[in-house]
Every structure is written in C-alpha cells, then in structure tokens.
Amino acid sequence: MAKSLFHGRSDSLPSRSHPLMSKLDDYICRLRASEATSTSSTSIAHKLNGLPDLHDCIDKLLLLPLIQQALAREKNGKCVDELLDGSLQLLDLCNSAKDTLLQIKEYTLELQSTIRRRQGGENGLATEVRKYLTSGKLAKKAIQKALTNLKGLENKYSFSCTDSSNEIATLVTLLREVQTITLCVLKSFLSFISGQKAESKPSHWSLISKLMLHKRVASDEEETQENEFVMVDDSLKSLVGCKTACKYDNFMLMQNVQGHLKNMEMCIQDLENGSHSLFRRMIKTRDSLLNILNL
C-alpha cells in the first residue's frame, strides 16, 4: 500500500507527518482501494474526479525547496528522466482519451438532432445511424491502439531506481506510484468508452425482450454494470436491423434508442468534466517538473 512508500525516507525530505504527505497517503490509499470497485461510468467518473486532487498535492510537493533541490541535483539521472518521460506520455494519453470522448460526444449530439428532426424519413435515419456506428468503430480502433501502447508505458514503471541517492529513489517511487494510479484510471476510462462486446444476432422479439430487461433493478449481490456506450450501440443495431412493419415495435425500439442516447449523454458529461480537470492538472505537474529540471 501507499504507506510503505514513506518508510526509510531521508530526513532531508518531508516526514510522513507533513500535511502534504498525509494527504498524499490518504489520496493514494483511497484511489488504490477504488481499483477493486465496479467499472460503471459512475465509478470511473468518481476516480477521474479524484485524480486532480492527487496531482494537486504532488504539485504542492514539488514547490517545496527541499524537493526541488533534490530533483535538480539528479536531473540527468535515469530515474528522473524516466519520471519526466512517464509524465509526458501520461499527458498525451489523457489528451487522446479526452479528444476521443469529445468526438463520440459530437457524433451522439448529431445523431440525437437527426432523430428529433427525422430528416429524410426512416431511410434517412437509418443512414445516419449507420454513419454513427461507422464513426464509433473508427474511434474504438484508435482506443484499442492506445490501449496496446499502454503495455509499453506500464513496463516503464517496473524499473528499479538504483542509480540515485536513497532520498531520490524514495521520492521517485512516490511520484511513480501516482503515475501508476493515473495510468490505471485512464486505462479503465479508455476501456469503458471503447465498449467492446461480443456481437450476437437474436431474433426481433428477443431483441425487444433484451431491451426491456435493461430496465430491471439488479440485486445488490448480482448487480450488473451496464455500459452506456454498449447499450447505445446495441439499441441502434436493433433499430437498423428491425425488419418488422409493426409500428408499435418500431416505436418501442426508437424509445429505447432515445433513452440510451440520453443516458450516454449524461455519462459523457460526467467523464468529460473529470478528464478535462485531470488534463489541466497534469499540465501543471508537467510544467513544474520541467521548471525544476530547467528544461
């Protein structure tokens, strides 16, 4: 756990009783504990909203003269170089996740507008739905590429800081722990919005039943975590694939599409707020490191 990071620290660095260290300990423990919680949009948004506070605490830590002096002395060391490199890569990853979410938001708003106007009649609507699904596939491919690249970034956090003083090694370990937590949250974030799910081809009536089942309340012991992005895709595919001429069936499918799009819109808003706040805070942390290292 995070508490082990404070053992054996040099007297030249802030002690564990320092207010900043206590806050860091608390934030790290809370975020680490949340890793075992659900992967619902609410849970991921909560984690995203907690990261800026963690990075703000790191920012304040980097303002301490003793910390700045210790890092400046080792600015050409492997540990510090790896720390800065990790910070820059995480910033790029966060920016990519933020931009991808913005693209999905734009596609969603455009589709909602088309559904409301019903431009081009039913055929026109089907064309817009297919365009949305195609755009979504492109976004998912970009996310999968980013997730693949994460493996290389994760490996960088496994190196041992053995070429620096004990105080620098301890400090770098602490900062790297923050980067690791940030990486884990961003990975969950990207995985969630990619909404990967095995496709199936049930009959029309089973599609209706499946959509209705989403409205049930799961028990506390067997709660199913619904992914708003997956549910929108499923409902749109059901709408486009519906071959029946029954107006009631079409109406029910359209109602489900609109309901899932509305839920996803609110989900995107929560995730967008958290990712934007995190990105701004990570920029500040990057600038603080660059300033200390005179880069």
Image (cartoon, rainbow, N blue to C red):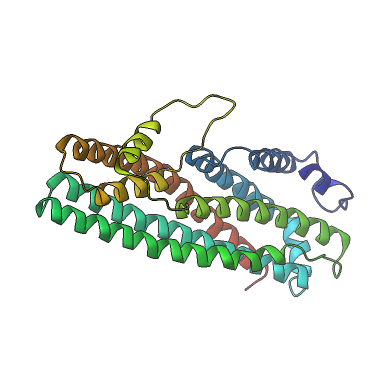
Residue 244: quarter of image:
top left
Looking at the image, residue 172 lies above or below residue 255: below
Residue 78: quarter of image:
bottom right
Q: Residue at x 20, y 54 (%)?
A: 126
**In x, y percent, where is residue 186?**
56, 54
Q: Nearer the viewer, residue 225 or 270?
A: 225
**In x, y percent, where is residue 200?**
42, 50
Left or right of residue 277, residue 85 in this image:
right
- The furthest residue to the left: 120
Left or right of residue 99, residue 124 in this image:
left
Looking at the image, residue 234 lies above or below residue 75: above
**In x, y percent, where is residue 74?**
78, 69
Looking at the image, residue 25 lies above or below residue 63: above
**Residue 140 visible somewhere in the drawing:** yes
**Residue 92 visible somewhere in the drawing:** no
**In x, y percent, where is residue 228?**
41, 43
Residue 282: quarter of image:
bottom right
Q: Residue at x 56, y 47 (%)?
A: 52
Badge count: 0
Q: Nearer the viewer, residue 56 or 260?
A: 260
Q: Residue at x 52, y 53 (%)?
A: 191
Q: Nearer the viewer, residue 37 or 92?
A: 37
Q: Residue at x 64, y 39 (%)?
A: 34
